[in-house]
Image (tube, rainbow, N blue to C red):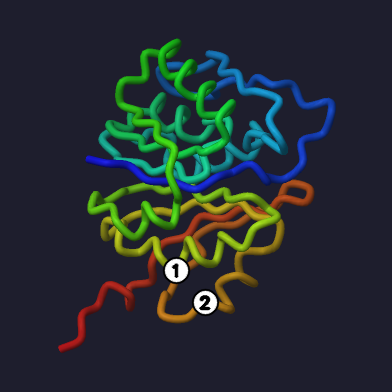
Amino acid sequence: MPLHFKPSASRRPKSSNVANRVRLIGGNWRSRIIEFPDADGLRPTANSVRETLFNWLGQSLHGKRCLDLFSGSGALGFEAASRGAIDVVMLEMQPAALLALKENQKKLGATMCRIAATDALKFLGTAIQKFDVVFVDPPFASNLMASTLTELPALLTEDAMVYTEWHVPITEVLANLSHVDWEVVKKGRAGAVHFALLRLAASHHQTPS
């Protein structure tokens, strides 16, 4: 199946004391290190936030199909694969980050991961595969959170969970969306980062009689 994606060159700034490596925290590759380049603004989801997220998701993603939009370092996508996901689509456009993703894939033997460089919104508009878990962590300087959450429902299974990471509370984003009814399952904050777990509200799945 062809894959499509969006650039992440303008992700939030990376502080000078953030090392360009991250440790996977659970699953088959627990404690394995993945590396990422000193690309413009590239920074992985913090260990403490990833630990909270995968506690929310129930630790194991056995048999799940995952989509890691704006993959960046690949911390979320490779963590999902480590925890039993059978298919992980990882999308990244920044060339150095894309190369690092492919190198980490080879190092881990992550054959269940599919890495591609293409536009995220184009992918959401053309893909036909359904996903059980989706990670949405777009560049903070962009307006891609709202547009992604608007286009995403068509690619979700009925019980799908969607993780969001953003610089403002997700409730502020959802308040301005129309035509999509999201439910906030869990939410948290780590410094300036707001993160949440969403699912489509039951009303969104109902078909008119």
Residue receiving disc 1: 150
Q: Secondary structure at mark 1?
A: helix
Looking at the image, is 91 positioned above or below residue 122?
Answer: above
Q: Is residue 143 left or right of residue 62?
A: right
Residue farthest along the bottom direction in this orientation: 209
- Residue 65: image location, x then y, percent: 30, 41
Disc 1 + disc 2, Cβ < 8 Å: yes
Q: Residue at x 45, y 21 (%)?
A: 102
- Residue 166 location, quadrant: bottom right
Q: Secondary structure at mark 2?
A: loop
Q: Quadrant of the C terminus?
A: bottom left
Residue receiving disc 2: 177
Q: Is residue 166 left or right of residue 133?
A: right
Mark 1 and mark 2: span between their CA atoms?
7 Å
Q: Residue at x 72, y 45 (%)?
A: 12
- Residue 196: image location, x then y, percent: 57, 55
Q: Quadrant of the N terminus?
A: top left
Q: Is residue 25 left or right of residue 208?
A: right
Q: Counting residues from the N terminus, which is met first, the one under dot 1 or under dot 2?
A: 1
